[in-house]
Amino acid sequence: MSGPQRGFSTRAVHVAAPIGVGQQPSSVPVYQTSTWRASSTAELGAILAHEQAGYSYGRGYGNPTVDAFEQAMADLEGTTAAMAFSSGMSAIHAVATVIARSGDSIVASNRLYGGTYSLFVHVLPRYGIEVRLVDISDEDAVRQALEGARALYVETIANPLLTVADLESLAVCCAESGVESVVDNTLASPYLCNPAASGFGWVIHSATKYIGGHSDLIGGAVCTDAGRAARLRSLALDQGGAMPPFEAWLCLRGLATLAVRMERHCASAAALAEALSPHPRLAAVRYPGLPGHSDRDLAERQLRGFGGMLALEHAGGDAGAARFCDSLELAWLAVSLGGAHTLVSHPASSTHRQLDAAARAEAGLPEGLVRVSVGLEDVSDLIADLTQALDRS
Ligand SMILES: *Cc1c(COP(=O)(O)O)cnc(C)c1O
């Protein structure tokens, strides 16, 4: 291709070619390419029509780096297939719209991540899809709501109050009602819980959080069986929102250390919960591993650990919570979770600032709530920082 008869510009475009190495590298290479060269018109047509294996175009038709991440996710969640997305929200949107169409309804937990709540309450109704919110700890209410619905949508550990869904019972309700079962497993990660083993048909992750693990990417994934994954992929090709190759590479790198990171997140969160519980400036510490937590037994049965998230209720209400957040010296005030840095957020002034006190109460958010994503720092330093901030609040 770089023969002397071709001009400089032509050579500049064509000179680069993959080096055949004939050996396995320790790291999956990043195939940073949007399109793939075919050897014939017939071959390209067959690949695009999924009649022949091969690569064609990056928007969900496949990429070796993304494929490797999808296979790893399916393996770790115990499903037969997975599809990676450009964000958790694009994954949730794709699953909701592959299951439901205009005229259908979905039943969802009333304890939801803010973005999911907004998608369900503000966006899906524009497509003619109705979403009904229920208290998923009330099995009779769930069964009643599921009549005529297409799906149930829940979160394994709900953000930000850390309530735990009874996945086994809910999967039975879904099977008996003949509806699809969908779970957002982000806060548990595949290390703490595999909802497919409890009978859930669709397991969604924001890979932005524990899977990436370093607060340096946005991504999502859906783990399911091969038939559902094929329907999802076919819709997602036209919706857009496929995961880019470099993000897949970062996620693969994150997965390699997921188990050891989760062990540390869980151990430090448990130690912090215990150390902070007696503090007079706190009205409550919510952590599924604390003996007083309402879902402690369920969490013990269903999760391999109690997770890396805490919810603190400041005794001084929202003003006290804000003083606490503003007094932190080591932990960072930031949204998101699941990374190496301890991140603290105050829903009343950030993710839930649009809600007044009455609306927050209805959403189950108590006054003075602070959410903590416990990072990988020395736990003694975290206890010291959160304690000094409470003392000053
Ligand atoms: C962050 C988050 C999402 C959304 O994921 P993005 O990657 O930010 O789009 C969905 N569900 C839960 C539980 C989350 O924490």
Image: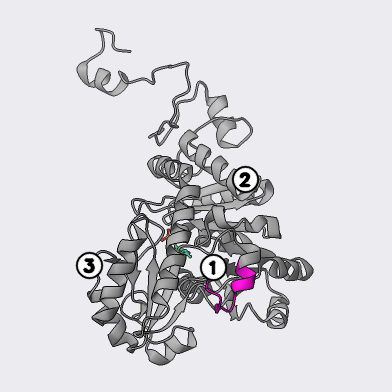
Find disc 3 in the rendering and name its residue: 329
The three-letter code of the residue at mark 2 reads Ala
Instruction: Estimate the x, y position of residue 92 in percent, counting from the top left.
Output: 52, 61
- Crowding at dot 1, Cα within 10 Å, few <14 / some 14-19 / many 20+, comes out as many
Q: Residue 235 in the image: x percent, y percent?
A: 56, 52
Please tell me whether mark 1 sits on a helix, a strand or a loop. Answer: loop
Residue at image coords 67%, 69%: 150
Q: Earlier in the sequence, mark 3 or mark 1?
A: 1
Q: Nearer the viewer, residue 72 or 303?
A: 303
Say which mark, if any, is on residue 133.
none
Identify the residue at image location x=59%, y=37%.
49
Residue labelled with disc 2? 81
**Magenta-drawn stretch, dominant element (helix, strand or loop):** loop
Amino acid on which the number 3 mark rests in the picture: Glu
In this view, which residue lies farthest toward the right? Answer: 176
387 to 256, vertically: above or below: below
Observer able to see residue 105: no
For residue 238, side relative to residue 296 (left or right) = left
| Disc 1 residue type (three-letter) | Ile
Number of residues whose C-alpha sits closer than 10 Å to that of mark 2, classed few (under 14), some (14–19) or many (20 or more): many
Range covered by the magenta-colored residues: 289-299
Please give the residue where the numbered disc 1 appears in the rendered image.
157
**Occupied quadrant, residue 316:** bottom left
- Say above or below: 109 vs 256: below
Q: How many marks?
A: 3
Query: Please, what secondary structure does the residue beneath circle 3 have?
Result: loop
Residue count near mark 3 (Cα–Cα under 10 Å), binned few <14, some 14–19, many ≥20: some
